[in-house]
Image (tube, rainbow, N blue to C red):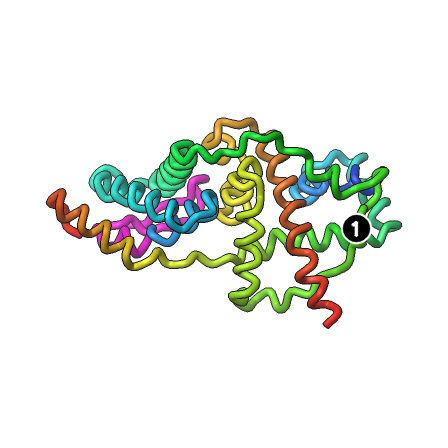
Amino acid sequence: MTCRELVELLLDFLDGELPDDRRQLLETHLALCPPCLAYLETYKVTIRLTRRLPNEPPPPELLERLKAVLRQEGLQA
Amino acid sequence: MNETQENSDGASPRHPAPATAEEVFQLYGPRVYNLARRMLGSDADAEDVTQDVLLQVIRKLPTFRGESAFPTWLHRVTVNAALSHRQKRAQRQQREVHDPLDALFEDGSHHHPVRGWSVGPEDQALSHETQRLIDQAIGDLPEHYRDVFVLADVEGLPNAEIAGMLGDSISAVKNRLHRARVLMRHALAPHFEEALTR
């Protein structure tokens, strides 16, 4: 298994969806290849960082625009 | 407002049902606005989409009050509105999207050095600088990958639900998600590797 082949399998590996034989090949490669081990860890960090992104509040002007449209339609804003 | 709604997979309650237009602004404005902003890469376009979606929500409130389908419906309506807005802009990237893995590997091995990252404690809020870096990297993704990445890794939607929203197969969604993650990792690496050597 090459490094690229390993990286191609990371999503299925992390989702636990790799067949046993492929998973064993991947784990053997990881044990012998520090760059791929670092790649796996930083791939996981990328996912975790992204999941921590907060949502910004919409700009107040947008809410005022919405309220104006609602008032025009006779709906309570 | 005592009603609660279930996750799209029918699991634990997640969202209270909105009762008034004012509550819709507070409860769903940030989610709709940020999903649209990250898909479209434009604050102004996200505002237009958010206005359209929240108006739909408010008009349909009586229909959805107390129904567990509301969060799924909200995601779907936002995604459809964002995709429609993008088509109207006529800025969809027509060029072929090359496989990002081609540029990152040479003869099957890593083309660039691979080092660990220093990103700080995981239980602390992201710094504004880190948020900006991640949002910038998301905005730089080709649209082909960005939609799936935002829906999966920012919004946390299951691959099957994303496939239904985008009209793709689950395997296509997984393929695009993986390549988006590879591109994101590549974009973020210099910043966090630099932090390690300071």
Tell me if residue A18 is in the magenta stretch: no
Task: Identify which residue is drawn at 14% across, 50% down.
Answer: A76
Kindly indicate the quadrant of the structure image that contains residue B182: top right
Question: Where residue B77 sits: x, y (%)?
Answer: 36, 37
Towards the viewer: B184 or B98: B98
Residue at the outermost left position: A74
What span is colored magenta in the figure?
Answer: B1-27
**Res. B35 visible in picture:** yes
Question: Where residue B139 sits: x, y (%)?
Answer: 53, 48
* Number of numbered discs: 1
Residue A33 appears left or right of B163? right
Residue B141 appears left or right of B5? right
Residue B162 appears left or right of B13? right
Kind of residue indicated by mark 1: His
Is B197 placed above or below B131 here?
A: below
Question: Where residue A68 sits: x, y (%)?
Answer: 18, 50
Task: Identify which residue is drawn at 33% across, 41% down.
Answer: B70
Kindly indicate the quadrant of the structure image that contains residue A21: top right
Is B162 placed above or below A42 here?
A: above
The quadrant of the picture occupied by the C terminus of chain B is bottom right
Crowding near pointer 1: few (<14 within 10 Å), some, many (20+)? Answer: few
Towards the viewer: B158 or B12: B158
Task: Identify which residue is drawn at 23% across, 49% down.
Answer: A66
Residue corresponding to mark 1: B112
**Res. B76 visible in picture:** no
